[in-house]
Image (cartoon, grey):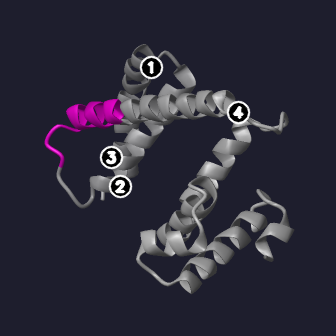
Amino acid sequence: MAAPDEVDAVYRRLFPKLVGMVSLYCGDRWVAEEIAQETLSRLWERSPAQVIDSPDAWTYRVAMNLANSWFRRRAIERRAKDAFRAAPSDDDRRDPDDFLAVSAALQHLPPRQRQALVLRYFADLSIEDTARSMGCAPGTVKAHTHEALKELAKAGLIDREYADD
């Protein structure tokens, strides 16, 4: 493992360069600082186990990859908000941020629970059709749905009464 003085020297040398480069690329200094920190963190994690021939080039590539991921996430969020705003709704109180919060919570569910919820409530399939689509028994769909709704209720995203059905 590198000595603390060496790590500090690499950090002091690369951090300003990374922040400047990413700031120019994405136009946001705060995001650039986060990306630079994440990049140097990845360098630190990797360096004891793997020799990196050119740490500068490696960090620049990682920083650009992280910046591109940031752009993709922003584009996805923007499209999701636009789609949510454009969707017809009987409820004027719907908020795009709520939609994003539910979407994020769904990503923390196990894949089969997430699939059951999306098929049942977004695609509006019956329990039997969901079971056919998932290749499982209707009881399994009910169990996955029940567990997923309990998790969303724990997160405060739906009323507990829906999780108890």
Point out residue 19 in the picture as x, y percentages from the top left corner: 44, 24
Q: Main secondary structure of the magenta part?
A: helix
Q: Amino acid at mark 3?
A: Leu
Whole-angstrom CA distance, mark 1 to mark 2, is 25 Å
Whole-angstrom CA distance, mark 3 to mark 1, is 21 Å
Task: Find the magenta span and give its range.
Answer: 52-65
Q: Is residue 33 visible?
A: no
**Image position of 78 (left or right of 164):** left
Q: Which residue is mark 3?
A: 43
Whole-angstrom CA distance, mark 3 to mark 2, is 5 Å
Label 1 environment density (alpha carbons within 10 Å; few <14, some 14–19, many ≥20): some
Return the mark for residue 132: none
Q: Earlier in the sequence, mark 2 or mark 4?
A: 2
Q: Which residue is mark 2?
A: 45
Q: Is residue 68 visible?
A: yes
Viewer-nearest of labels 1 and 2? 1
Point out residue 127 in the picture as x, y percentages from the top left corner: 59, 73
Q: Which residue is mark 1?
A: 26
Instruction: Name the residue located 49 percent from the left edge and 15 percent from the top edge.
Output: 27
Q: Which residue is mark 4?
A: 88
Secondary element under disc 4, as helix, strand or loop, is: loop
Viewer-nearest of labels 1 and 4? 4
Viewer-nearest of labels 2 and 4? 4
